Image (cartoon, grey):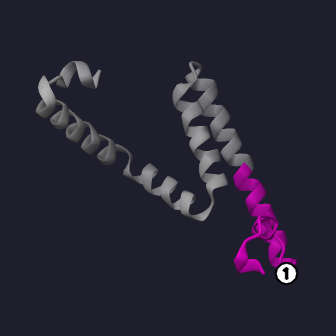
Amino acid sequence: MFVMENWRPGAWGALRMGLVHGAWCVGCCWALMGALFTLGVMSLGWMALIAGLIAAEKLWPWRTIANYGVAAVLLILAIALAVDSVGGARDAGGGWGAMQGDPMTR
């Protein structure tokens, strides 16, 4: 839809369209981009998982099922991490960080 409404001919038109669309994307999704960047710096595995969930939510033709499915996966992950962090507080060196080889837990 964006291309149809904002089409500009030539190289300068393409540059202008790219800048406008890029500005719109950053304005719309800056928090999501920041979260994925932070996850990518901390753990590529978690970033890939969350990016996959976002892609599934956006690309699957069954929007309602995809939205509820992603919400259920995130809820299960949150509960698992909360339970693990409570157990990890009692067990020195336990938790997900130790399982992934986190250098901070050694």
Q: Residue at x 55, y 57 (%)?
A: 40
- Which type of secondary structure does the marked residue at label 1 adopt? loop
Main SS of residues in magenta: helix
User: In the image, residue 97 lies at what x, y percent?
Assistant: 75, 68
Tell me the amino acid under the disc marked 1. Ala
- Does residue 92 show up magenta in the picture? yes
Residue numbers of the magenta segment: 77-106
Q: Residue at x 15, y 31 (%)?
A: 11
Q: Residue at x 44, y 57 (%)?
A: 34
Asked where in the image residue 10 lies, by quadrant, the reply is top left
Count the marks: 1
Quadrant of the rendering where the N terminus is positioned:
top left
Which residue has dot 1 on it?
92
Q: Is residue 10 left or right of residue 41?
A: left
User: In the image, residue 46 lies at what x, y percent?
Assistant: 65, 53
User: In the image, residue 32 lies at what x, y percent?
Assistant: 45, 49
- Does residue 90 show up magenta in the picture? yes
User: In the image, residue 15 lies at what x, y percent?
Assistant: 18, 36
Of residues 68 and 59, which is closer to you in this image?
A: 59
